[in-house]
């Protein structure tokens, strides 16, 4: 049985991640991550895509066809399956996740902070303001990790979507916010990996220069997908484009729980590869490039910056 963290960066474009998120791209370059492009489901709107990611089916089947449909999920989903299998779930996320998996409408007094084993999201810290700083969401996720040691943790920063609507995806504000988020994750991802967790980072949808999303253009459909196994080597930049619907069975497989028959997609490979080679050891004859030395401590010891 494994543990997994899903970092769902709301509104993060694939090309923006590639140019602005240096830490994540470093993990790809040294093959600690497998990088793919995920094709977001239609419509490229948050609530339908949240459900597509967690249920593994499109909106024609899960029924959440619009953002303006605050109701609980009615199809098998990752949170429900995990709790039914005796696993622990947690989320630091926008309140629409509470409505989808814990119940709607959202009640500020009862639902904002949840620690209840009977709920599908057992340990939830939910925010209502789209401008909530991503640092606060990441801090809540770190707290949930330490306090409850969840098997499945959803981390859902909203800052990029907020800036995309305010300034457009072609703006300096959107681009620099992606780098800011990358810095926040550079502090957290090594801790999650060191605690034996697989980390998956993706987005619900992208964003366009018209400060919008919902349509079919590559700007809103193509989102990044990084898979970091808890140890060992990954595939690096695969160049593959995969369906967003494969995330749900992938999460189930990583957790070691049975996926639902409704989840038609195949799980992506997240199993660990062989460990990185030690420096100085020969690797076959001649043509192989010299490999960088592994970090001194842990799988991702991050150098201190002055
Ligand atoms: Zn949006």
Image: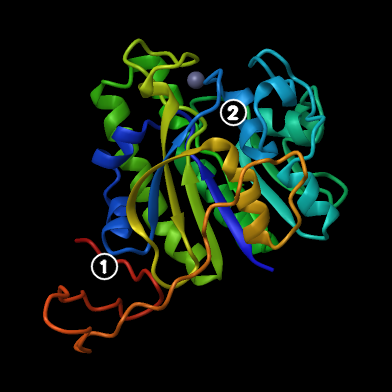
Is residue 13 positioned above or below 168 on the image? below
Q: Nearer the viewer, residue 122 or 45?
A: 45
Point out which mark residue 256 bears.
none
Query: Where, by quadrant of the figure, is residue 281 drawn?
Result: bottom left
Query: Where, by quadrant of the figure, is residue 189 drawn?
Result: bottom left
Is residue 8 positioned above or below 299 on the image? above
Q: Nearer the viewer, residue 213 or 245?
A: 245
Cα–Cα gap, marks 2 and 1: 36 Å
Q: Note whether ligand 1 is within 8 Å of mark 2.
A: no
Say whether residue 270 is left or right of residue 1: left
Point out which mark residue 49 bears.
2
Measured as percent of width and height from the top left, residue 179 is found at 30, 41
Quarter in which the C terminus is drawn: bottom left
Label 2 crowd (10 A; few <14 / some 14-19 / many >=20): many
Q: Residue at x 55, y 56 (%)?
A: 142
Measured as percent of width and height from the top left, residue 140 is found at 58, 48
Q: Nearer the viewer, residue 235 or 87?
A: 235
Q: For the image shown, how many numbered marks are present on the structure?
A: 2
- Of all residues shown, which one is farthest toward the top? 210
Quarter in which the N terminus is drawn: bottom right
């Amino acid at each position: 049985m494994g543990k997994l963290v899903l970092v769902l960066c709301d509104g993060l474009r694939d090309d923006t991640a590639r140019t602005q998120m240096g830490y994540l791209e470093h993990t790809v370059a040294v093959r600690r991550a497998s990088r793919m492009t995920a094709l977001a489901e239609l419509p490229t709107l948050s609530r339908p895509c949240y459900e597509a990611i967690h249920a593994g089916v499109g909106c024609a089947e899960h029924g959440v066809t619009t953002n303006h449909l605050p109701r609980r999920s009615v199809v098998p989903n990752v949170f429900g399956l995990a709790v039914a299998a005796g696993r622990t779930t947690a989320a630091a996320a926008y309140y629409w996740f509470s409505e989808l998996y814990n119940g709607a409408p959202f009640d500020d007094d009862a639902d904002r902070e949840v620690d209840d084993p009977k709920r599908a999201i057992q340990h939830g810290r939910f925010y209502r303001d789209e401008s909530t700083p991503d640092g606060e969401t990441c801090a809540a996720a770190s707290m949930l990790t330490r306090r409850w040691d969840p098997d499945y943790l959803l981390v859902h920063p909203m800052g990029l979507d907020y800036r995309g609507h305010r300034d457009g995806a072609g703006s300096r504000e959107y681009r620099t916010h992606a780098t800011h988020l990358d810095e926040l994750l550079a502090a957290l991802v090594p801790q999650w990996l060191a605690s034996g967790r697989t980390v998956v980072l993706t987005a619900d949808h992208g964003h366009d220069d018209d400060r919008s999303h919902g349509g079919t253009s590559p700007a809103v459909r193509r989102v990044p997908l990084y898979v970091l196994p808890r140890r060992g080597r990954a595939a690096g930049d695969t160049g593959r484009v995969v369906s967003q619907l494969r995330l749900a069975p992938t999460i189930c497989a990583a957790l070691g729980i049975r996926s639902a028959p409704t989840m038609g997609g195949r799980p992506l490979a997240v199993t660990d590869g062989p460990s990185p080679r030690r420096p100085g050891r020969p690797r076959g004859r001649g043509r192989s490039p010299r490999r960088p030395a592994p970090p001194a401590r842990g799988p991702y010891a991050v150098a201190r910056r002055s």
